[in-house]
Amino acid sequence: MSMPRDYEVFVLLDHANELAVHDVCADRWLLDVTAGMYLASDVACGEPEVAPELPTTVRECVARAAQLTAQWDSAELTPSGRMLVALLATLAAEMGC
């Protein structure tokens, strides 16, 4: 089931992944960000593409993605969607977002 702004979450995590590759401070989160990106791609599959304004740091991308997914109705989420919401909530907390 489609969730509001699910493609935007994918774009944010894809961008965070690109930033994390070049940010030694984000090394410890790279695997989680990459996992989130792949979960988000599953959730957003087939949705219309959007081009959101992209933050400049990994932390900002994760915080924004976590804010968006926190608004999703958990009763309507697929297993991938539920894993994504949980992963982003945990990652945002670990990053101090």
Image (tube, helix red, strand yellow):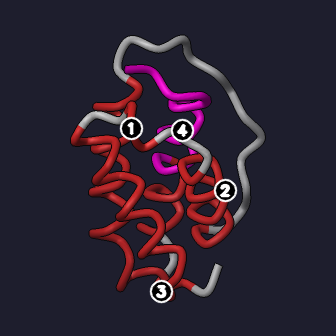
Is 26 on the left-hand or right-hand side of 78? right
Which residue lies under the disc numbered 2? 64
Residue density around tag 4, few if under 14, some if 14–19, many if 20 or more, within 10 Å: many
Q: CA distance from mark 2 to mark 1?
A: 22 Å
Q: Point out the frontmost of discs 2 and 1.
A: 1
Q: Amino acid at mark 3?
A: Glu
- Report if the CB atoms under discs 3 and 2 are less than 8 Å apart: no
Q: Nearer the viewer, mark 1 or mark 4?
A: 1
Question: Of residues 76 and 66, which is closer to you in this image?
Answer: 76
- N-term-proximal mark, 3 vs 1: 1
Question: Circle 3 sits on which residue?
Answer: 94
Q: Secondary structure at mark 4?
A: helix
The answer to whether the residue labelled 3 contacts the one labelled 4, judged by CB atoms less than 8 Å apart, is no
Furthest residue to the left?
79
Q: Amino acid at mark 1?
A: Ala
Q: CA distance from mark 3 to mark 2?
A: 15 Å
The Cα atoms of the two marked residues, 4 and 2, are separated by: 11 Å
